Image (tube, grey):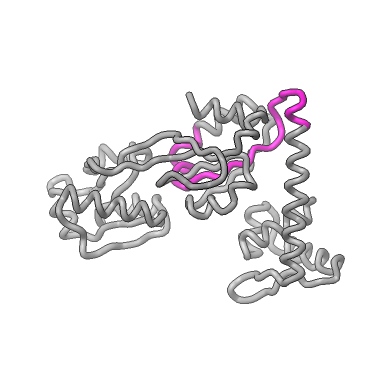
Amino acid sequence: MKDFTLIVALDTYRSMQKAASHLFISQPAISQRLKTIEHNWGRDLFVRTSAGLTPTPAGEVLIEYAKAQLQAEQTMKDQLAKMDNHVAGSLKIGVSSVIAQYVLPNLLAKYMEEYPEVRIELQTGLSADLLRETPNRHLTIVRGDEPMVGMHVESWFSEPLALVYKNRDATAYDILTDLPFLSFQAEPSYHVNVRDAIVKQYGVWPERVLEVNNIGTCKALTLAGVGAAVLPACSVADLSDRCVVEPLKTSSRKTWLLYEKELTHLPQLRTFLQLLSV
């Protein structure tokens, strides 16, 4: 099963380095193990290029087989755990990056302390990316508009968005017209929501927009006075004493829980959902 896990990780990340980081093993060890796997199957499974890894036709077939085998193993583990209602086994969770950074840590720490026999497998990223792999997890937590997927979708919470900037002596209008707007990587619907709310509340949209890769960088630039940013409420608790934080009256951000209802029979998922509902 370790070989199957490695093959699926290489397909997911298309990079030896990223797969090695995900699996907590060295890049040379992954490279050597892949050569051994390819030798055993008598086929090249990936084409190595400067842009990364691309599966060969044989690789695509084996990747699907590996996913099926890993899923079958997980299903068996879940069934065994369900038999005695013992809270153990694995809990695979996909979480929006913002939630993973600002909401999940304390909840996850509490859960792991209470149920130490549960093995947490966590994937973070943009909601759009996470939605592509929902069947491979017990629970997926995403942001934005209600997802249209073939499973149970449940609203977890909704929070306001706020315009944040450093200069307390300036008005929001002055900041938006004089300084760049700081935008972090998120779903297109988030950016549309932000733009509409700012134009409606302040009657202006900044001429200059600086795009950064994540919300942490965006906050750091805001604290340095580089520009203004719109941030979700869960991320601004540490900024209120150092910046102006103005709620956007017509804007909010929803967070959703996605899971198969049948999986709530699994004690590890059921207890985690109970924790989120408190």
Identify the residue shown where x is 67% and y is 52%.
24
Looking at the image, residue 185 lies above or below residue 81? below
Left or right: 73, with 235 as reference point: right
The percent coordinates of residue 112 (x first, y second) are 61, 30
Viewer-proximal residue, 60 or 247?
Answer: 60
Viewer-proximal residue, 155 or 88?
Answer: 155
Left or right: 32, with 178 as reference point: right
Looking at the image, residue 59 lies above or below residue 256? below
Please count the marks in the image: 0
Query: Does residue 238 appear in the picture of this structure?
Result: no
> Which residues are drawn in magenta?
80-106
Identify the residue shown where x is 63% and y is 59%.
12
Magenta stretch: residue 205 in it? no
Identify the residue shown where x is 70% and y is 57%.
8
Identify the residue at the far bottom of this view: 50
Left or right: 166, with 85 as reference point: left
Identify the residue shown where x is 78% and y is 56%.
3
Left or right: 246, with 37 as reference point: left
Magenta stretch: residue 88 in it? yes
Looking at the image, residue 190 lies above or below residue 54? above
| Quarter assignment of residue 21 | bottom right
The percent coordinates of residue 121 (x first, y second) are 63, 43
Query: Does residue 202 appear in the picture of this structure?
Result: yes
The percent coordinates of residue 147 (x first, y second) are 47, 46
The percent coordinates of residue 229 (x first, y second) are 28, 51
| Quarter assignment of residue 244 | top left
